[in-house]
Image (cartoon, grey):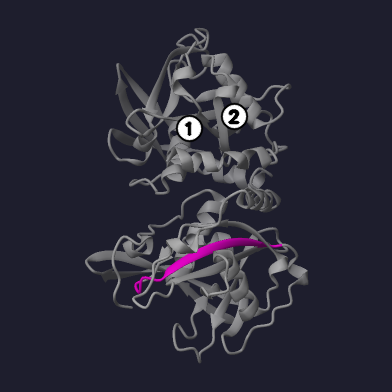
Amino acid sequence: MEQRLETSAQHVRLQTPVKSPTTAAARGAVLVCLFQADDGHLRVILTKRASTLSSHSGEVSLLGGKKEDGDGDDVDTALREAKEEIGLEPSLVNVVTVLEPFVNEQGMPVIPVIGILNAKEAFKPAPNPAEVEAVFDAPLEMFIKDDNRKQEMREWNGNKYLIHIFEFEMKNKYTIWGLTASILIRAASIVYKRTPPFEEQNCSYKAAFAEKSNGMGSSNLEQRLQTLAQHFRLQKPVKPDLSPTSTTGSIKRAAVLVCLFQGEEGNLHVILTKRATTLSSHSGEVALSGGKREQGDADDVDTALREAKEEIGLDPSQVSIVTILEPFVNKLGMTVVPVIGLLSNKESFDPAPNAAEVEAIFYAPLEMFLKDESRRAEEREWMGDKYLLQHFYFEDHGKEYDIWAITAGILIKTASLVYQRQPAFLEQRPKFWSGTAHHTTA
């Protein structure tokens, strides 16, 4: 668990800080400081604010505060505030990443900075009594569990939303709620790679800010992906010897390329194909470029890029690889590895579909796979596991396409990663996609 976070620590050092939106008069940052407890679980450092403070007195909060003139970026703000509030030395914190901004009801963006406490034993809390009444820590995973949680319906600016309230006891009783709870739900969802078993329904002023500001604008989305591309080059690629094999000893592994580019309107799009009707499997269906691993492929990236060139004439030199997602597994036990890449220059890509494999090439907006529009869910069951297959309907130049099954699942996962939010519908993926069952039938 901690190793997963450590692997990402270099990522934030390469990032361009999230820009301050022109509409916001102030900006804040909070430190989500994690450490590994003796039982192996991750915990987060929290404080109870002093009862003498003029705002949010006596409430539980993360370390943090408003940006000051001397702060170089959001990381500086969060680390400075942590030192001022509880004496946490910045040298003890290994910063992992910066999440998408949250916005409070006053319209101020609050940037969550995730960091790992290198040596818990070296940290001696020294709370500033003018700001902090108590320092404590709580298990991070509790924020994606339905235990000791309640919710309240609130209304803001004519929009109804849910406030989540977590009750926690460690010597004293603490109530963790509001923006602090929302940030911790998001952080836990990312770290544990699963959604909470309850509806989040964050206040819509967060979404409104994201649309109006440059904080999550199209240029910053692509910038985030470009930053991740540098991070990927520091990591070791997935090794082929981890792949499942068939009874004949051949590698049952495939890779698909999730190739993204910025459209004219500024939104990210993904390149998709409609498979030729003459193919023996999945004929006429929508797919990502990709296919089975071949002997000459060095890794999953090679497989995805080779297949994209063979299928649609996409030259590998035009694609900047971003990262590799966790594999999906189909019913036949084939491991399918999604490789995310950025098309460097859309204008220089001249599609050349291989007629034996591809009937059509089209581009769909990535964000559509998080929306509950032009979508339906088909209930299925396999080996006692009930699940939903998502269908997204998309029209391009008078042609209608049905994007579904594992292709839709990969695109939902990609969009959730890029836009750092969960889909607006119940996904309920098949368990076998995670390789948790044995597969013998199609």
Q: Position of residue 160 (x, y in %)?
A: 44, 42
Left or right placement of residue 36 versus residue 360 in this view: left
Q: How many marks?
A: 2
Q: Give whichever of discs 2 and 1 has the lower sequence position.
A: 2
Q: Which residues are magenta?
A: 331-343
Element under label 2?
A: strand
Residue 335 pos. (x, y %): 43, 67
Q: CA distance from mark 2 to mark 1?
A: 12 Å
In front of the other: 322 or 414: 322
Instruction: Residue 179: give its label.
Output: 1
Image-quadrant location for residue 15: top right
Q: Nearer the viewer, residue 152 or 321?
A: 321
Judged by its main secondary structure, the magenta piece is: strand
For label 2, count other residues whose C-alpha is less than 10 Å away and answer few (under 14), some (14-19) or many (20+).
many
Give the secondary structure at mark 1. Answer: helix
Q: Is residue 407 magenta?
A: no
Residues tagged 2 and 1 counted as in contact (Cβ below 8 A) = no
Q: Position of residue 277 (x, y in %)?
A: 51, 90
The answer to whether residue 280 is above or below residue 141 is below
Which residue lies most toward the bottom here? 278
Closer to us: 139 or 217:
139
Query: Tag 2: residue type?
Result: Ala
* Residue 397 is at least partly visible in this image: no
The N terminus - image quarter: top left
* Residue 147, horizontal then vertical, whole percent: 27, 36
The label shown at residue 29 is 2
- Residue 332 magenta: yes
Look at the picture and state if 326 lies above or below 199: below
> Which residue is at a point 69% across and 44% down the rendered structure image?
214
